[in-house]
Amino acid sequence: MENSRTSAASPPRPPDDPATALSSSAPAPAADSAPVKGAAVRPGDKVFLGLSRGSGIALLVIMAAIAAFLSYRASIAISKDSVNFLTAFDWNPQADPPVFGIGILAFGTVVSSLIAMAIAVPVAVGIALFISHYAPRKLAAPLGYVIDLLAAVPSIIYGLWGALFLVPYLDGLTRWMDQFLGWTLLFDMSNPGSPARSIFTVGILLAIMILPIITNVSREVFLQSPRMYEEAALALGATRWEVIRMSVLPFGRSGIISASMLGLGRALGETMAVATVLSPGFVFTWHLLDPGSGTFAQNIAAKFNEANDFGRDALIASGLVLFVITLLVNGAARYIIARRKEYSGANA
Amino acid sequence: MSDKLLLDKPDVAGAQPSGTLAHRRLPRWSPIVIALLAAGLGIGIGNAAGLQSRIQWGLIAALLFVVTTYVVTSVVEDRRQAKDRVATSVVWVCFIVAVVPLVSLAWTTISRGVKLLDGYFLSHSMGGMTNLEEGGGVYHALLGTLEQVGIATLIAAPIGLLTAIYLVEYGGGKLAQAVTFFVDVMTGIPSIVAGLFILAFWNLGLGFGPSGFAGSMALAILMMPVVVRSTEEMLKLVPNELREASLALGVPKWRTILKVVLPTSIGGIATGVMLAVARITGETAPVMLLVFGNSLINPNPFSGAQESLPLYVWNQYKLGNAASIDRAWAGALTLIAFVMLLNLLARGIARWKAPKAVSR
């Protein structure tokens, strides 16, 4: 992006701005600079440029192929569907005529991700602030390191822990919510005491899973917030909270938003953690604490083994919907990050 | 922002009737005392009310902590200080709320996994075992994971590396912009979608059966954008003067890249690749769709179903009896140890080979 602005004349760079200095330090493109007279284009250069450009093109081809193949198989399945694919609640592609739709899956995916976001974003911002502004200096660095490591824990392990450890521990909490919040309908349990393998538990587990990534990105942003503002606020007698509220949070707002979107993208596509914890069902219910419902990814994992070729096409169709949703969410996140880069480049 | 601060100041000063510079302050140890008190009360109330789940105890304690802090501070100090202290206590509570499950995750995996994890477990497969039998091992899964991840790395690392070189050293045109955008998009692809793509293309389209190689292709798709991103960042850190010096000596561009740019940034690139490897090692979903699982040792990744570590954990969990759950935990510990080892190694390389010129 910024590379394209770098002309051969190389405009003067602001020396105090590492972001622009770095990207504009990328050498001027060789491809469109006219070869100097006498210096023939060396074959080695040609081969190397060809190879590296080829890899870039290969990446584009892969993306195109993903979209094309998924759409093709999905169109086979959807054309034979006897109900509306987008709104139906059943999943019986092997029935005759095939009946399947993503109603339940879309509901479960959205609700579990929303629960995860509602829990994870405030807590993650809290931890990020803790690391960047509250923790004792000695604790902060190793803590950031540990959070980095936690982001690398495989999802199947979160799932295993969720199913065998979190579910029994959530029993009391869900009963409590049923007792005190049951009137909201959302938190009413039809069968109190049944194991908490519900969409709500999935939301909590997803929240724990996306905490590290949201924390990491927000912490990076908070650490970049201009020291001058903070010191100015402190000099005026602001308390630490006032400093954060008036100089750190406004600066980091778009960073928090994009971090949350990245976390949301991960929560939407999470497979194994959901598949281990949830006991799925295809009856629609508003009761989030009852077992049942499902998510796109979980449904694919659960139904894959019993599916014949047409059933697999149907699963691919649901995967295509997931693909499109995550593309939109991630695209929005990247857009916000890109916009922020420009304005922070001016005052970093 | 600073305007707002100035505007806030007068009424803040007005809120302090005493007019002296020294205000009454809580002693330094007061947050700790309040925290201990809240924890004690939380446990007490939880016990008295007969709440079984310790999550409830914790929530009660956290709530008490925040509320008490606010009340005590607003009585002794003023409302501004109270808000500040509440913010501090909320941030601490957030930290503890997050640390508890993550520590519990690590502790559970280690304590339950260590029961079975030994030389026998690592060197035996599940061949000839019934599901309920105790014993068995993870050798076939470890072998499968190593092969699949190895092949995926062989595919993804060169493509990712060359793409990053293209973007940084040759980029600037429309094509480079498109590649940058789609690398971003690719980073967000859910792993199961990558698996479905290979399924649609390789298995349903070309008619191949499940194999380790099919899994490797899906893993490679997940790995590529990560490698591109991290390599790009590292190449951008190479000072332009090095390139210019080399080119001025008449060294061809491709040799400049190979002999000057890459050696300068090799530490960071290796770190990025290893972090990407660590990421795909734990991917279960595409492996489940494409590699299928196998309780026997299948050393050939190109034909027949294989096993892999995350898949092993999932399959053992699904069997659901005591012996298989033990195996699932031991498999999980093996997997987590492997991933953490890769991570630590990657960070070790990063520290050892860090570019000295640019400090962050």
Image (tube, rainbow, N blue to C red):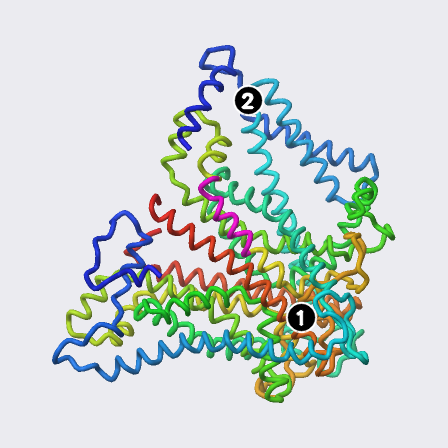
Crowd around label 2: few <14 · some 14–19 · many ≥20 (10 Å): few
In the rendered image of this protein, does residue A315 appear above or below residue B50? below
- Dot 2: element: loop
| Most foreground residue, B243 or A108 | A108
- Chain assignment, label 1: A
Outermost left residue: A38
Magenta residues (range): A250-262
Label 1 SS? helix
Q: Is residue A207 magenta?
A: no
Query: Taken as a whole, is the magenta stretch helix, strand or loop?
Result: helix
Work out whether residue B303 or residue B247 is closer to the camera in this orientation and state it.
B247
Residue B341 is labelled as none
Relative depth, front residue between A129 and A101: A101
Closer to the camera in the image, B91 or A248: A248
Q: Is residue B57 above or below residue A99?
A: above
Disc 2: which residue: B27
Residue B148, picture quadrant: bottom right
Q: Are marks 1 and 2 on the same chain?
A: no
User: In percent of the image, x 55 and y 33: which residue is there?
Assistant: B88
**Residue, disc 1:** A318
Q: Is residue B285 left or right of residue B243?
A: right
How far across and down, in percent of the image, does residue A290 sit?
A: 81, 55
> In x, y percent, where is residue A310?
71, 81
Quarter of the rendering occupied by the N terminus of chain A: bottom left
Name the kind of residue labelled 1 in the image.
Answer: Ser
Q: How many marks?
A: 2
Furthest residue to the right? Answer: A191
Q: State the quadrant of the C terminus of chain A.
A: top left
Left or right of residue B345, residue A30 in this image: left
- On the question of residue A320 being in view, the answer is yes
